[in-house]
Each structure stands twice: as C-alpha cells, then as structure tokens.
Image (cartoon, rainbow, N blue to C red):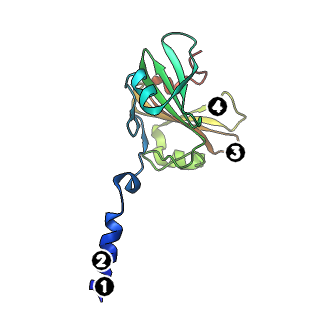
C-alpha cells in the first residue's frame, strides 16, 4: 500500500521551488537580497525603488512601486528597510504587521527598549531591539490599538521617524 503513495509524494516534492519553499524573513541585516549596507544605486536598480524624499545629497527615502516597502539610505548605502502594511512579511522572530504588542514584548523580553510613539495616540509605542547596539536592530511601531503598524530593520536610521529631516 505504501508504494502507491511514493510517486505522489515524489511528484509533490519535485514541484516545490526554493522560492516557494521559504520566503525571506526580515532581520536586522536586511530582507532577502535587500541588505543593509548595499549601495543605493544597486538597491534602486534591483528592486525598482523610486525616490520620494531627497532633502539632501546624503539621505534619501525610497519606495517600492506598491509603497509597501520603504528604504532609507544614508551616504549612498541602504541604512534601513521598512515594511508598511504587509502582514505576509515575517521577522526572524515570526512577527509581522498586525502582530500584537504583547507578542513583540514576549519575543524579545527585557532586551526591548520601549518609547512612546511620537505620531500616534497612547498607548502606541516604538519597540526597539538591537542585535548590535546602535549598529543593527529592529524597531516595531505599534498603534493606539496595540498592533504593529510598521517594522523598521537596519542601522541607526531605524530611529529616524521623521525620515531624512
């Protein structure tokens, strides 16, 4: 009986592609092939980003075509990656836009820095975890309902909540 199932199982395993098997996760160092520290020109070319804010020559805010991905560059290099409104993108801790603040707190424990969100009503917060203090981290923005609204990953620019300004 088991031999009859073998061809079906073999067919199913061959039909999976590596891309379908595992989606990239957001870490303090990047998201898939989009890496913190990569040259801005390469990020623009490879990921079809457009400049939204270029107040000076040293800092730019770039967006994907669907505006669910924001990239902040500083001195010609990717500094941070922000996921906006995409619950399908997971962090390396399994969190996503829409996760509860309590889940973020549980995932990081006392290593989390908690500050009030400057642009949303209390009890909205910035929840920041540093993989390497001030060099690489992830910041979760929560809204007044206690849900993650945006996730920022990268260098110190994750804390630049006003963009380049």
* Among numbered discs 3 and 2, the one appearing first in the sequence: 2
Rendered image: mark on residue 7 = 2
In the rendered image, residue 43, in percent from the top left (x then y), is placed at 42, 27
Q: Which residue is mark 3?
A: 145
Of tags 1 and 4, the one toward the viewer is 1
Identify the residue position indicated by label 4 in the image. 117
* Quarter of the image that includes the N terminus: bottom left
- Where is 73 relative to 112, above or below? above
Answer few, some or many: residues within 10 Å of disc 1's Cα (few below 14, many 20 plus, some between 14 and 19): few
Cα–Cα gap, marks 3 and 2: 50 Å
**Which badge, 2 or 4, is on the more N-terminal residue?**
2
Left or right of 125? Residue 92 is left
Q: How many marks?
A: 4
Q: Nearer the viewer, residue 61 or 148?
A: 61
Question: Separation of disc 4 and disc 3 at Cα?
Answer: 12 Å
What element does badge 1 sit on? helix
Kindly indicate whether the residue at mark 1 contacts the one at mark 2 (C-beta within 8 angstroms).
yes
Of marks 2 and 4, the one in the foreground = 2
- Please identify, in this view, whether the residue under mark 3 or under mark 2 is nearer the observer: 2
| Label 2: which secondary element | helix
Say which residue appears at 62% left-offset and 35% top-offset.
Answer: 125
Q: Residue furthest top?
A: 56
Query: Badge 4, how many Cα within 10 Å: few under 14, some, many 20+?
Result: some
Does 57 appear above or below 93? Answer: above
Query: First in sequence: mark 1 or mark 4?
Result: 1
Name which residue lies at 60% across and 48% down: 98
Mark 2, Cα crowd under 10 Å, few <14 / some 14-19 / many 20+, is few
On residue 4, which mark appears?
Answer: 1
* Res 148 label: none
Q: Secondary structure at mark 4?
A: loop
Mark 2 and mark 4: Cα distance apart in space:
55 Å
Q: CA distance from mark 2 to mark 1?
A: 7 Å
């Amino acid at each position: 009986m088991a031999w009859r199932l073998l061809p079906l199982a073999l067919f199913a395993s061959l039909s999976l592609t590596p891309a379908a098997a595992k989606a990239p996760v957001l870490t303090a160092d990047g998201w898939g092939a989009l890496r913190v520290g990569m040259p801005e020109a390469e990020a623009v070319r490879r990921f079809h980003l457009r400049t939204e804010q270029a107040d000076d020559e040293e800092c730019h805010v770039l967006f994907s075509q669907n505006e669910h991905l924001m990239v902040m560059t500083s001195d010609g290099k990717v500094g941070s990656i922000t996921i906006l409104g995409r619950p399908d993108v997971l962090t390396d801790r399994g969190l996503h836009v829409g996760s509860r603040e309590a889940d973020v707190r549980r995932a990081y424990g006392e290593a989390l820095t908690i500050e009030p969100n400057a642009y949303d009503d209390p009890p909205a917060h910035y929840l920041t975890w540093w993989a390497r203090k001030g060099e690489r981290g992830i910041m979760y923005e929560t809204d007044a309902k206690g849900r993650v609204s945006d996730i920022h990953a990268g260098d110190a620019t994750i804390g630049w909540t006003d963009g380049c300004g």
